Image (spheres, grey):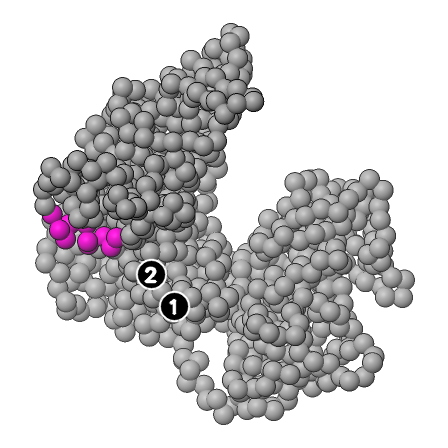
């Protein structure tokens, strides 16, 4: 009977997979080329892989000793650039086992730009009395940028046909001569590898569609072209274009080398290139043209016709060093494929066998195979986590916890709505309903009515190590498994064999005493009582609580300013988070990037109308509260806060110098412009509401409330765990309250009761609860010392079974009929209401 400790040993892995590494110790490779990832578990190689140090050094030495001029000139430095770029084109074609006689390389700003080039240049034909028009067909498991081609196609009257993956081989027949004679051009697009699940689609589809033997080509006469989206595939697999001659192949180089970003290419079959048509022409693409006559002759070479303007020649030159370095470090793409697939297969095997103490699986993995064949599956693992009741753990919660442990993953739908819908069972109507509920692609709304809106993806690169697998699995076990852990022994035994066998539906979980990978005496955490079992009657409407603390945070991410009473403004507590500290590029700083911000103590004096910033060892600096004051030499600017564009006003050189001295880097203080307000992200009002909720520089809503009873539960858990681990890291109540950076702190009757409230009244002011606060790693910053810790986020996840929500967001709903400015005061009664049918005042 295999235990997790045995299973996650390198010896067991080495017996399972014989193709690990590249002839040298993998740690030696990391120490030499990737020292910057020490302490980091990077598992987002499908997003971008990491560049090795020798690539950058080689590139630097190249451009340091050579002068590269604009390739459109003819002087010696320009010719050197031209010749070097041409050499790189050849190297790219060699990498894909083809030649300049067969393919051309058109450099673009990325894979998306390459796809747009095809969309804009393909000779779409509209239907007419002479015959049917073109068809644009694409697999539903395609990246957004591929699906976007339909916009250009639809404008030309082209029929757009989404194809389910199983339909391609549903009909197979030989094409007839009549079908071959038609000249109507059609385009079929599919990914060589799904960026969602890592599933590899058969490369033989290329010739099958071109010869009109596969669906949909076999059903429609004309000339069929194939666009093979290879961006995800080529990062860890070899693509042979001589064997699979797709007409169009878009790629992004940072997926392969990690550097440079913003550079891609469209590989085009030369016999196909002649059908492409351009309307726009830019510098360098013309053989001749006239100013006063519609006369234009393009350059003869394919790349010269489509590369408008000056190409990014220095970035292109760096590709030579990318290919050289990759070859030296790994030997071949086959070695990379073997190495990364082995890591992915092993991680899949272990993760798919993890079970909670009651035998229910920890993860639901999204794939159509069992990682037994690297021709069918890439080095990507996509999944959702489940609690012991079979409920989905929101991907945003997992992402935040992973960040705390410095594990870099990707969550969401990965710009692949089709695959996301298929694997998560999201209907078209669900997508529309989720949008109405406020969820958009790329946000952190991970659950809508308990159903997932996205998933979790880990992906491996050529520098990934077995330790990365261990760290990831340890994280899953420690943070999301109800102990004691069990393993599906029957499934494990089957998957650990080299040849796939028939799966068995039954399994017998075996308890594992050791709940932590690599430790012999892991603490067993018993299942916490379900919050659903807490009687609703103990959360009665009208029960009274007390407001015990009131905090404002004038400068975003700086220390709090505690008050006994404070006026309310149009955006929440008056002057709460109206200022922010930005770096020299205008990027808003937070404690996640700059922990020392918590040591800056803002103090607002309403009588003197000033904001004062203080820090130990430095003379304070003062800023006027009056937003109308203008500073010489500074201007209004735009920056981003929580994804929103915010117009701001600079607060001058004096405070800028003060902040720069303290933080040790160029910084400025900006104030939100009073002329432009942000709107709420969560709990948005329904259409037709008379007014919208305005925000300052807060993350989500006007107010954040926490309950001391909830804090007490967490404090007890931390104390118990620290006692068991013999570490003196306990936090008292007030320290924990400070960590959660709430505006309103109440003394409630029961822990987490506030999460069921719909409305509450404080004094005479009514508030609406708009959602729970999903805590990020920022609460792991000690607000007194600026030191980073794993508390209290780790303990919060443990005591709440993987959930890291704590506190609720509020918006102001009504105020007293008095003409006086509403004020909140410590000691005020807090009366909640939990009715879901409560009237919105």
Query: Which quarter of the figure is the C terminus placed in?
Result: bottom right
Can residue 694 be seen in this snapshot?
A: yes
Q: What crowding class fits label 1: few (fewer than 14 Cα within 10 Å), some (14-19), or many (20 or more)?
A: some
| Residue numbers of the magenta segment | 163-172
Q: Is residue 168 magenta?
A: yes
Q: Which mark is residue 421?
A: 2
Task: Measuring from the top left, give residue 27's x and y in whole percent.
Answer: 36, 36
Q: Residue farthest to the front? A: 129
- The residue to which callout 1 is attached is 430
In the image, residue 760 sits, relative to residue 670, either above or below, namely below
Q: For the stretch drawn in magenta, what is the main secondary structure?
A: loop
- The residue shown at (77%, 85%) is 817
Q: Is residue 672 above or below residue 686?
A: above
N-terminal-most mark, 1 or 2: 2
Residue 47 picture quarter: top left
Residue 705, position in %: x, y? 62, 73
The residue that appears at 17% across and 60% down in the rendered structure is 491
- Residue at position x 63%, y 52% in the image: 645
Q: Secondary structure at mark 1?
A: helix
- Residue 684 magenta-drawn? no
Q: Foreground: 787 or 232?
A: 232
Above or below residue 621? Residue 296 is above
Q: Is residue 765 left or right of residue 515?
A: right
| Residue 101, x across and y down, in percent | 27, 19
């Amino acid at each position: 009977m295999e235990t997790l400790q045995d299973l996650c040993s390198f010896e067991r892995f080495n017996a399972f997979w014989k193709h690990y590494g590249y002839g040298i110790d993998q740690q030696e490779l990391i120490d030499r080329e990737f020292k910057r990832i020490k302490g980091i578990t990077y598992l987002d190689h499908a997003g971008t892989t990491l560049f090795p140090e020798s690539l950058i050094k080689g590139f630097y030495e190249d451009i340091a000793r050579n002068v590269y001029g604009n390739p459109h000139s003819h002087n010696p430095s320009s010719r050197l650039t031209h010749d070097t770029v041409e050499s790189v084109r050849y190297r790219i074609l060699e990498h894909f086992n083809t030649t300049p006689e067969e393919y051309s390389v058109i450099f673009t700003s990325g894979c998306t730009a390459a796809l747009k080039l095809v969309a804009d240049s393909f000779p779409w034909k509209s239907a007419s009395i002479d015959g049917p028009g073109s068809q644009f067909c694409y697999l539903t498991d395609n990246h957004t940028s591929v699906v976007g081609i339909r916009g250009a196609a639809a404008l030309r009257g082209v029929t757009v046909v989404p194809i389910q993956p199983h339909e391609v081989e549903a009909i197979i027949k030989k094409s007839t001569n009549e079908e071959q004679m038609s000249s109507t051009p059609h385009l079929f697009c599919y990914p060589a590898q799904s960026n969602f699940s890592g599933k590899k689609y058969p490369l033989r589809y290329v010739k099958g569609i071109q010869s009109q033997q596969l669906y949909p080509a076999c059903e429609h006469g004309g000339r069929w072209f194939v666009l093979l989206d290879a961006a995800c595939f080529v990062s860890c697999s070899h693509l042979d274009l001589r064997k699979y001659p797709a007409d169009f192949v878009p790629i992004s180089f940072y997926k392969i080398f990690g550097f440079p970003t913003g550079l891609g290419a469209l590989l085009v079959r030369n016999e196909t290139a002649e059908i492409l048509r351009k309307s726009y022409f830019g510098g360098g693409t013309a053989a001749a043209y006239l100013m006063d006559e519609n006369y234009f002759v393009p350059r003869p070479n394919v790349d010269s016709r489509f590369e408008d303007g000056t190409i990014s020649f220095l970035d292109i030159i760096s590709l030579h060093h990318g290919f050289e370095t990759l070859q030296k470090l790994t030997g071949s793409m086959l070695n990379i494929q073997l190495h990364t697939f082995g890591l992915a297969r092993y991680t899949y095997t272990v993760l798919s066998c993890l079970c909670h103490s009651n035998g229910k699986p920890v993860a639901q993995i999204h794939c159509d195979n069992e990682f037994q064949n690297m021709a069918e599956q890439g080095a990507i693992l996509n999944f959702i986590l489940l609690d012991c009741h079979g409920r989905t753990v929101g991907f945003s919660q997992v992402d935040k916890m992973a960040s705390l442990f410095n594990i870099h993953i990707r969550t969401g739908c990965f710009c692949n709505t089709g695959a996301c819908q298929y694997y998560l069972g999201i209907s078209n109507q669900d997508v529309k309903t989720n949008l109405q509920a406020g969820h958009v692609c790329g946000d952190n709304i991970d659950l809508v009515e308990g159903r997932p809106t996205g998933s979790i993806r880990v992906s491996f690169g050529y520098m990934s190590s077995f330790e990365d697998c261990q760290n990831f699995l340890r994280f899953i076990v420690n943070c999301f498994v109800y102990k004691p852990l069990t393993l599906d022994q029957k499934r494990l035994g089957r998957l650990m064999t080299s040849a796939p066998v028939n799966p068995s539906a039954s399994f017998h979980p075996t308890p594992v005493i050791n709940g932590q990978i690599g430790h012999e005496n892991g603490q067993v955490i018993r299942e916490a009582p379900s919050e659903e079992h807490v009687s609703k009657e103990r959360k009665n409407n009208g029960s009274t609580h007390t407001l015990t603390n009131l905090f404002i945070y004038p400068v975003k991410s700086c220390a709090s300013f505690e008050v006994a009473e404070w006026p309310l403004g149009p955006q929440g507590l008056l002057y709460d988070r109206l200022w922010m500290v930005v770096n020299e590029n205008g990027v808003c700083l937070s404690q996640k990037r700059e922990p020392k911000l918590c040591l800056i103590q803002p103090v607002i004096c309403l009588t003197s109308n000033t904001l004062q910033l203080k820090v130990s060892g430095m003379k304070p600096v003062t800023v006027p509260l009056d937003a109308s004051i203008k500073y010489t030499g500074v201007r209004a600017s735009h920056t981003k806060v929580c994804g929103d564009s915010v117009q701001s006003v600079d607060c001058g050189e004096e405070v800028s110098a003060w902040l720069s001295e303290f933080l040790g880097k160029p910084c400025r203080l900006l104030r939100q412009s009073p002329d432009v307000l942000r709107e709420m992200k969560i709990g948005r009002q329904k259409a037709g509401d008379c007014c919208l909720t305005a925000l300052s520089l807060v993350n989500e809503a006007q107010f954040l409330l926490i309950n001391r009873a909830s804090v007490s539960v967490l404090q007890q858990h931390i104390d118990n765990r620290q006692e068991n681990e013999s570490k003196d890291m306990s936090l008292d109540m007030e320290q924990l309250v400070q960590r959660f950076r709430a505006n309103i702190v109440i003394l409630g009757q029961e822990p987490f009761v506030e999460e069921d409230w719909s409305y509450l009244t404080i004094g005479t002011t009514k508030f609406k609860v708009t959602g729970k606060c999903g805590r990020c790693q920022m609460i792991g910053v000690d607000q007194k010392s600026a030191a980073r810790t794993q508390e209290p986020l780790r303990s919060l996840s443990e005591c709440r079974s993987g959930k890291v929500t704590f506190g609720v967001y509020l918006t102001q709903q009504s105020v007293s009929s008095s003409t006086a400015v509403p004020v909140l005061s410590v000691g005020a009664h807090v009366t909640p209401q939990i009715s879901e049918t409560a009237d919105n005042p």
